[in-house]
Structure formats: structure tokens, C-alpha cells
């Protein structure tokens, strides 16, 4: 995309310490912050913040429920339009993870007072066009001045309560499918340090700007028991929430997910965001890493921004789900990565070594 001179002069990722979902408050710290808060009980509130789900769900009628979420973060890309598109894609994903369809959205924005107007416009344009692609509408929003730019959306969608998905419905015996490649957190950290190639950056940005709408539209036609999107807590953090929510254990094959080119190599060199260390600290006591190499572990713990859906599907329907995702053509990195097991004792997550069969 051609940029005006003012846009070229602004490197958005240099204006912030943390990028994208790597700025997310760690899961352990978040639990402490929310503990003890009074929660109003409402029989129509089907999913609230007292669980670890991606969005809230409120029943309006027997056939219609609202899906409500909000998500925003500092720049994950230098190009303003790309940043806006990724931030919007990431916010919309929470609705898709619940099996819903987004309908309306509100902009949530913070910008420095001296940020050029054309840069702000391009951030908003990226968000507007991605929401349009999702079949939804931006109907307003709120903006403030801040020393670091931030952008995202508050999104309202609809879902039939009988068909809603949460991250707590996985059944022992289910297969686990991940719909996007891993490595965004590593590659964007490498890019911020001037280590990543333009091809690496383009790969990460294409993935982040791909709506989970396409995976969701396929997913809801299959025998899916649970879903979540993989974002700031990394694959292992979100898998742990899924396991805890359903009181199950999860086996993950460490070599099964698609990995973005050079992500594992950068991790081997220690090019990792701070969020990886927060995620590892939170989840490692519940993860049996076996003999999986440290750099692969790090990528599995690493924050993802606008990551894929982690889907728990009946094992008898897993091959058909993967086939339909592949046939769609817009979910090229979907992989079968593990299975759900009964939890008896010990860590809830077990990594299967690269040399073992799952």
C-alpha cells in the first residue's frame, strides 16, 4: 500500500513497549485482579466473566443470544492500515470462537496528540474494511489521547443458545484441531529488533489479518464440543483453560501445529516476547513438556495475536472437519494437533515428543 509521507515517518511498533496480544495482562495476574468481585446472577447470562471464555453470552429469546466482547492492543504492525485490520480481526475472533456471527462494533482508540491525522485515518480504515469483510458494521466508538497508540473494537454478535460454543465443553476422546500457524509472537518480536525479513513479517501479518470467520463457518457444520481462539496466553495457556473448564486432560503433539517459517529458529536464539515468560510462569506447573526441545516449548507458550481457533471435535468427525477446512481454501494451516483425555492426576497438558506417535 502506498503511504503518505507522514505515514512513512511513523513506525508504530516503535511507539510502544509491548505489541499486540503480547500486551495482555498475564492469566495468573488477571485471576488475582478479578478475585472477590461481586457477580450479579442472571439466569439469562449464559456465559460471564467468571469463566475463562472469549466473550459473554446473554440470552434474549429461546433462539437468540447476544455475544459481547471487547479487545484492543498497541501496534503489532508499522503500517497503520495493517495495524487497524489486524486489531479488528483479533476482536472479531472472540465472537467466532463462541460460534457466533458479529453484527455491530464500536471503535476503541487511544492516540498520541501529535500523531498525524492521516495515520489515525488509516488505522480506522483498516478496522472498518475488516469489519465490512466480516459482514458487520461499525456504528460508533470512543477515542482518547494517550502516549501510546491503541486500537480495537467492542463487538456485539448473535448466536443461537442451543448452538453456542464455550471453551469448557471438550469431551474425552475428542480430537483437537488448530486452524492457524504458530509463531506470530516470535516473528513480530524479531521484526521489532530488526532481525526478521520482509517475508517473515508479511507471513505473520497475512495470518493475523485473516478472519476466523472462515474457520467458524466450517466449524459450526460439524460435531464440535468446544472452541477458543489462541491469542495472548499462547497455545498452551488457552489449551490449559480448555482442559480446566471441562475437567479433562489434553495431549498435544509438539510437531503437529503448522509453524511459521523461522519462528522456531528465532526462539532458539532467545528472540521471544516478555509475554512468553509470563505464560510459561502461569502454565508450566500444569504442562508435562517431556523431551520436547526448549525452543519448541517456547513457541507453544508464546503469545499469538489474532491466532487461530482451537477446536475440540468429536473424533469421528475430525477428518471431515479438516477436509472441509482445506476445501474452503482460506484456512490452509489447519492441523490435527492432539486429543482430549480423562484427567486423573498430574499436569493437565502433556506434550508428546517429536519422535512419538500421538
Image (spheres, rainbow, N blue to C red):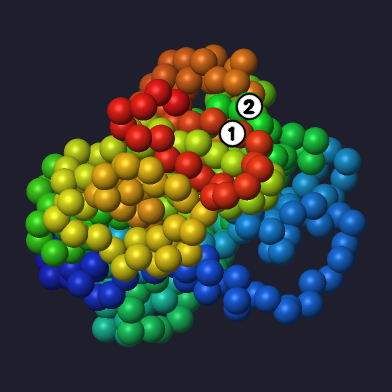
Q: Residue at x 78, y 47 (%)?
A: 65
> Looking at the image, can residue 200 be seen?
no
Q: Quadrant of residue 227?
A: top right
Provide residue 56's location: percent of width, then percent of height. Answer: 69, 56
Residue 12 visible, this angle: yes
Q: Nearer the viewer, residue 258 or 21?
A: 258
Residue 73 appears left or right of 67: left
From the image, tell me which residue sits under label 2.
Answer: 173
- The quadrant in which residue 280 appears is bottom left
Crowd band around label 1 with a 10 angstrom C-alpha radius: few (<14), some (14–19), many (20+)? many
Q: Position of residue 241 (x, y in %)?
A: 58, 52
Position of residue 139 in the picture relative to residue 88 (left or right): right
Quarter occupied by residue 275: bottom left
Residue drawn at point x = 67 percent, y = 50 percent: 245
- Pick the front one: 113 or 78: 78
352 or 262, nearer to the observer: 352
Secondary structure under the numbered disc 1 in the rendered image: strand
Mark 1 — residue?
340
In the image, residue 83 sits, relative to residue 212, either above or below, namely below
In contact (CB < 8 Å): disc 1 and disc 2: yes
Q: Position of residue 155 (x, y in %)?
A: 59, 56
Quarter holding the C terminus?
top left
Is 115 above or below relative to 256?
Answer: below
Question: Which residue occupies 84% across, 71% down?
Answer: 40
**Which residue is drawn at the image coordinates 38% and 43% (left, top)?**
290
Amino acid at each position: 500500500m502506498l503511504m503518505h509521507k507522514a505515514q512513512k515517518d511513523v513506525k508504530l511498533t516503535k511507539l510502544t513497549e509491548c505489541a499486540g496480544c503480547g500486551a495482555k495482562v498475564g492469566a495468573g495476574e488477571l485471576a488475582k485482579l478479578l478475585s472477590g468481585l461481586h457477580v450479579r446472577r442472571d439466569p439469562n447470562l449464559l456465559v460471564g466473566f467468571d469463566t475463562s471464555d472469549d466473550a459473554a453470552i446473554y440470552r434474549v429469546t429461546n433462539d437468540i443470544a447476544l455475544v459481547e466482547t471487547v479487545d484492543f492492543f498497541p501496534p503489532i504492525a508499522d503500517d497503520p492500515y495493517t495495524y487497524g485490520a489486524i486489531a479488528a480481526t483479533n476482536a472479531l475472533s472472540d465472537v467466532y470462537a463462541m460460534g457466533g456471527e458479529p453484527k455491530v462494533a464500536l471503535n476503541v482508540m487511544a492516540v498520541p496528540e501529535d500523531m498525524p491525522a492521516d495515520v489515525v485515518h488509516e488505522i480506522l480504515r483498516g478496522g472498518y474494511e475488516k469489519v465490512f469483510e466480516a459482514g458487520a458494521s461499525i456504528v460508533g466508538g470512543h477515542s482518547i489521547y494517550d502516549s501510546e497508540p491503541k486500537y480495537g473494537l467492542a463487538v456485539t454478535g448473535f448466536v443461537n443458545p442451543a448452538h453456542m460454543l464455550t471453551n469448557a465443553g471438550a469431551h474425552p476422546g475428542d480430537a483437537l484441531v488448530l486452524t492457524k500457524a504458530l509463531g506470530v509472537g516470535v516473528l513480530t518480536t524479531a521484526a521489532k529488533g530488526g532481525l526478521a525479513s520482509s517475508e517473515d513479517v508479511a507471513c505473520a501479518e497475512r495470518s493475523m489479518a485473516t478472519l476466523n470467520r472462515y474457520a467458524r463457518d466450517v466449524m459450526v457444520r460439524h460435531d464440535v464440543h468446544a472452541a477458543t481462539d489462541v491469542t495472548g496466553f499462547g497455545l498452551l495457556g488457552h489449551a490449559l483453560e480448555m482442559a480446566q473448564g471441562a475437567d479433562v486432560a489434553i495431549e498435544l503433539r509438539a510437531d503437529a501445529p503448522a509453524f511459521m517459517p523461522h519462528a522456531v529458529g528465532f526462539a532458539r536464539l532467545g528472540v521471544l516476547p516478555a509475554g512468553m515468560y509470563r505464560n510459561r510462569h502461569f502454565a508450566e506447573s500444569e504442562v508435562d513438556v517431556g523431551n520436547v526441545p526448549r525452543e519448541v516449548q517456547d513457541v507453544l507458550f508464546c503469545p499469538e495475536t489474532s491466532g487461530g481457533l482451537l477446536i475440540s471435535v468429536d473424533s469421528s468427525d475430525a477428518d471431515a472437519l479438516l477436509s472441509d477446512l482445506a476445501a474452503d481454501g482460506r484456512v490452509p494451516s489447519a492441523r490435527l494437533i492432539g486429543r482430549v483425555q480423562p484427567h486423573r492426576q498430574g499436569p493437565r497438558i502433556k506434550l508428546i515428543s517429536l519422535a512419538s506417535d500421538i
